[in-house]
Image (tube, rainbow, N blue to C red):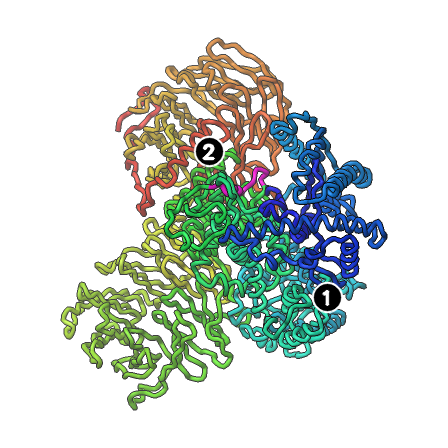
Amino acid sequence: GFPPQVIDAYDGLDPDDVLDSRAQQVRLQLLEECRESSAGPFFVALIGEQYGDPCLPVQIEVDEFQEVLQMCQQASVSTQLLDRWYQRDENAIPPAYCLLDKQELLPNYYCQTDKKARERDRQEWQEAFQEMNMIFHAIVSRCIQEGKLGPEMENKYFTSVLERELRFALENRSNEDVRRCLCYVHKIFNMSRQRERTAGQQSGLLSDPDLQAFCHTKSNTLLCKLREDFLPCMVASSELQVYTSTTTCELRQGYTSEMRQGYIEGLCKQFYTNVLNLIDVTVSRNTSQIDSLTEGILQQADLCSIYSRLYRIQCAEVEQIKTYLTQKETKYPLIVSGGPCTGKTVFLAHCAKQADIWLRDKDPVIVVHFIKGDNDTLKQLLSSVCQQVAVSYGQPLLCIPKDISQLKEDFLNLLSAPSEERPLVLILDGLDQISEAYKSQSIWWLPRSLPPNVKFLISTAPRKFGILQALKALYTDQSQFVELAPKERKDCSKMLTELLFSSKRRVTSGQQIYVNKALNDCSLTLYVELLHRQVSHWRSDVEITGDSVRKGVHENIKWFLDQLEEKHGKEMVSKAICYLTLAKSGITETELTDLLSSEDNVLMQFLPQEDLPLKLRVPESAVEKLLLDLKGFLVRRYLLGSQVLFWVSRHFPLVIYKLYLSSDKRVQEIHNAMSNYFNGRWAYGRAKPLIINQGLTTQTKRLLSPPQAFSNSPLVKIYIDRQQPSQPWLFKSFFSNLRKTHELPFHLKASGRLEELSRSVMLSLGFHQAMLEAGQLNELINELEETSQLALCKELRLLASILRSATCLLQSCPADLTMVIQIKLLPFLDIFPDLVSYAKQIYQEGLKKCGVSAVRSSVSCVPSIRTVLPGVDVSPIVDVLQTQCETIAMLLDNGCVWAWKEDVVDGYRLINSSDLLFSSAKSAGNFLMLSTKCNRMLLCNMEMPTLIYEIDAQKPVTSSPAAADTAVQGFLIVNSRIFVWFRDANYVRMFDLNTGRRLGQLECQYCVTCVSCSSNEKYIFCGQEKSTVSIFDIQDEGFRLVMSSSSSAGTCVIDVLHSELRGEMSWVDSFGNVFVWNIQIMVEPTLVKECCNLEDQQKVLHTEHSPENRTFLICKQAHIVLWDTSSWTVSDQFKAPRNRSFIQAVLSSNCSLIIASLENCQFLLVWKRITGQCILRLDIGHTQALKMIKYQSTLVAIAANGFLTAWDLDLMLGASSVSKTGIKIKSVLVSSQGEHIYTTDGSDGVFKWGMLTDTIEGCFCHGDPVEHFKLTVAGEHLVTSDSSGDIYIWKTDTGENQQRIHGNHPSHLLITPNSHFVVSLCENSFSRVWKLNSGHVVCKIHLYLKNAVITPESTFVLGLHKRDLLAVSLWSGCISKRFSCSSESDVMAFQPLLDYTDYVALITSSGDLYTWNLAEETICQQVQLCVPSLNQLDLFQISSSGTYAMISTAGATISIIDTLNGRLYSLEMTAPILFVSLTVSGSYIVFICDAESSNCVCDFHSKPVLKVVQASNGRNVGVCYLCKNPSALTVTDDSSIYVGFEDGSVGIYVISDEAEGRVNVKRHINQIGDRQPYLSEEPKRWQSMESASIVWVDSSTDHQQC
């Protein structure tokens, strides 16, 4: 999968700094980091003919340094350089002389603007370095000889950089570590003489020739000792891998470039082989990816280990935790609180690690979950915890995503699983970090009390979101609350001392005063860590003041980052920490290097001085050095199989956001860069442009200079390959690129690239496959649902619903994704054309993975979103209200009000106040009017739920007794006025919307029952009792009664409609009667139409008006009436199913569908208006729906128990486009071109289906139920017969019934291959051969032929008669040929061979398989069968060539004959076979079998399955889950499979394992999206002739015309 990270510690290092002591210390730290973090090889050494120089010691102890100085004085060697560069530091442990940093004495050493000053300082340092090095060589050697220094000092002063690093990697290491190292030794003979010639040149700075020779000899000795002694010793003791090569060079030519190149090539090949072998030996290969459950457990365990290691100061509160965990009974959770940086997370992680020790006499199950803010939702938290507890206690796993309330129930039930021997310790850190924590119900899921053997620890911030206060209200025992107090100063001081001691540092007493003062001001552990980074750099001679110590955590973080910028460069540091901060869940070191290499400003620091290369990247060593300085604050953790870096404290991101990410533009830039990286924009050698200033010199190119410095120089764009890795969704090893799947969607979303996110990621098959292969199905569903709130809302929700419905299947078999999508998505492609490209991806991939493709799916289920309101488990819903802002409000029986909308699927409590309990609620527009139980009226704006007005409705305007206040019946908002009417009141009150002030009231004649407004907002219509409507003019500031109209019906008006265009007012009364008035002259209304049904006295339950479709729906218990409002006539009526009553009915968006809820019915029924057919049943998860609410294209059904189920109305329309007859399909015929199919279902019709439109085009109607039907080869004519015995001839293109023939009742119909003649076989009378075009009888056949067929040449009718097989002439009706067996055997089954028209294959009862040549009348016996295999011979089928024959089926066994090899064998299936067919070529067996036994009740596991196997060997070719009950199976010559279903639908599938099938599928792929749009047109009905046009009579005359 991922490439190894190779770090060259010398890459990017200034050549003058190779021998720098501090640089070597960094290299050794990098080497140790590699050893600790690498899973495989971590060190490779290359040793040649040069030993190298030693570094100057960084620290020299005081006594040691003084000995060197004394010896220098004795030898008359100047100590001026040593005194200048080494300074005494009492803060070192032990006190020492420390080598000063070069920049302290040579400020221009790294200067980039003054080249001369820089070169001068560098030259001075080189001279000083060489001189000090030689002084140490001479003086230390003399000190050792005289015994003033120990012999071990040779290693300190004389060991070269090469040997020091080699010994650091290999010495005192375990054998396992040494085996992970490689060493290559290259010996070059005759190189020593060349070195002698150049030794003087190399040591030209040394003035003493004897000293030069001494150093040269000593280096050779040490190199020889290293190669000949140390390395062989390591090979013998620890099995170090050492590879030695030798090269001989001539004295004159020396070591040539050709020799060097040859050695390099050989080394590369050898290294590649060795590294691969070493990886295979040291790295354990994981052949399968970890599932999401295990991944989550490992992540939390890793975090627990990381945080527990940060516990450095003992907390007294630990004893309280220990007491809580060890006591026998605990009724409530223990709540840990504390302010920022008090260490709650570290504290709980430490307690989690100690719990095993405290409960050592038991076997506790410890479940720890660290909540990570926006990445953790309550649903994800509960799901993770439930699964961990379930696995630990052997409970059933929760494999299917559940709603939040069900997860709560599962969580509470699982808490009863622990036992006294195996108690549960559950620790949740950061309850206030849950992404839904801002809602008041964030603790509703917590148990009110704990069952036995459960210990529950929770941490939260004290004031955030009021969580702690809510917990104290839930758990009244205050002893269960522990507050972490700030640390004592003495503890912090002790911690700081220990940290300094670990780095061999301390502070002076004077400096300690300021440190103590700082710790008094802030005694947080993080502050101590930061303070250590600062004071560890203090030398004893540094003067410290009060301003020297930064106060507070954030100020110290800022200082620390400033130091990093100064050391590593501002651009590099700022970009690196921004990437680390904005990564979704950390970032790997390789990724960080890649990202920095893509940054132009960072890469400019590493441009070479010579010509620019075609490839360039930031050195890994430069990044690693930065990470070394961040160590402690930045830690590694394993996530999704990778080791990522993340901030251990959340305060670092807070400061980084403030310093570097304060602008949205900068944040978006970083997210854009990370998006480009993870989608591989600059991979595969694509060069990224780098813009540089042409005026930059080669020296100044190395650092980014201010733009104004070269403002007059033109900019040059060059293209450099940044060597970015490829980012496939799946690696070649079929491992998922989890880094890409995890990070890319997040960064695309954050950068606002929603189009790319939705189409290139969410609608990418590769993304889906990668997530499924990684076991991340639930995460994939969550990603789709979250993205659907930003783009492609319906499309992504549909995909999420499809995946959720197949969770049980896809979790066990991700490869079935293509088949699942084909089956479930096809019906909706016309509705959602944006899914066409995704569907094409699915089919292309399906051709590779599965030998069966679904080209027409009959699955028409509508996906839904279901949730349960958390608060309804306490009190049921009593009322549901709809608002225009797509929010549904629900009033509970206990007086609470909850709200739900699609983007907050779990709902939320609308008003968080225990003092306000409501008795009723009404809605209008975006507002909700709530009546409290204490007679207050509140108006709530649902767009801003916190904005609440109180309406003064207590006092009537007049003193009339009729004006007494009653319950609110409803309200209406017009402009800035509110109109409120009350139950049993004859007035409507008006209020000001902005102030709640009462404006007056409208007085009516009778009690007001409904109020509506005209479209121009000028008139108010008040419907009343006694069939009365009053109209008020409200356009002016005042209001006046315009007119009042009444009818004689005397009923209650429930709805008033107004058409300003037609000058018409219509109202509907409580019994569904309609009254239409002409109000063009407002003061003189005229009753135009009165539609009353006095016999129907049922009350109206619900109405709906669709002005754009001119439709008005009235729902009653017994029926639904649809009115055409253009003429106010009844357009449709639908009766309730038998013994059922309607509750409510609504219309689809285009009014083509009616959705109704019924009493005591747990599903909704959907009718297609144009056909009156019930086409769908929608499950609501409860006994009945309390109310249905429709907004835009979403329908929501709410049940009293809090179940909310939402469907997309467009999906309903798509599902309704799946044509079905409604009756079980019995047989299927297909035209030769495949453009039409014909089905029968036992009714009086034969249905014609169009493949281009996927609809039923028409029905051939008969007088009686159809029994038989046949299609001519060209498909021009259809011949049918019904139960009356009449035969019909139909013209298929026009539906014309050309002939209706009455004669003997046929038991079977046959049509000759040339389509000229028809044979009607009669079992109880003679059969006839007659002409298709005229009905003229050609001849009669007096014998009944069983299982008859016509030969391919249209010559004979073959059939069984008694014990023989007969061939009857179609011209004479006489028996032309006969196949008879012996007296003990009968012919049982037969079939002509299509490829050999003269041959017929047949089976006898004795088990013999013969081929009979009709022309020559010869017989050949091929196979002898065993008698038990002769069951169900009516299924006998043979291939067109006769190669394979299917004999029979029995249960789950299919018997096959290989006629070429004379072999009989059986294919054993996993479930009983329902339907089976052999393809014409004989290559495949197509069958439908029952579903295998499973505990799952989903359609994939409970419904029959279509399978295709290879006939020759039983190899599984493909599987298709039908998801419905099949009733018929037909396989055509082109390997297309047609399946009829019990609901009257037809599915079409293609065997894509062979070339012809793949061509059919590719043709279908090209046609996806081009299908004609679905039109709601009723299928045509072609009627038959009323009486027979031809009558056959049994006489000498063959037929008589009627």
Q: Residue at x 74, y 39 (%)?
A: 213
Q: Residue furthest right?
A: 147
721 inside magenta stretch:
yes
Say which quarter of the image contains residue 630. Answer: bottom right
Horizontal side of 619 relative to 990 (left or right) equals: right
Between the C-alphas of marks 1 and 2, the distance is 86 Å
Give the quadrant of the C terminus.
top left
Q: In the figure, 1355 relative to 152: above or below?
A: above
What's the magenta region?
Answer: 720-734
Q: What residue sits right under mark 1 in the picture?
A: 90
Front residue of this view, candidates 11 and 1309 = 11
* Mark toward the viewer: 1 or 2: 1
Q: Residue furthest top?
A: 1416
Q: What residue sits right under mark 2 in the picture?
A: 1550
Dot 2: within a 10 Å radius of its alpha carbon, few (fewer than 14), some, or many (20 or more) residues? many
Q: Give residue 952's position: percent from left, percent from top.
A: 36, 84
Q: Which mark is residue 1093?
A: none
Q: Give residue 845's position: percent from left, percent from top.
A: 49, 37
User: Mark 1: which secondary structure?
Assistant: loop
Say which quarter of the image contains residue 1309. Answer: top left
Q: Residue at x 22, y 73 (%)?
A: 1019
Of the numbered discs 1 and 2, the one sitting upstream in the chain is 1
Say which quarter of the image contains residue 5. Answer: top right
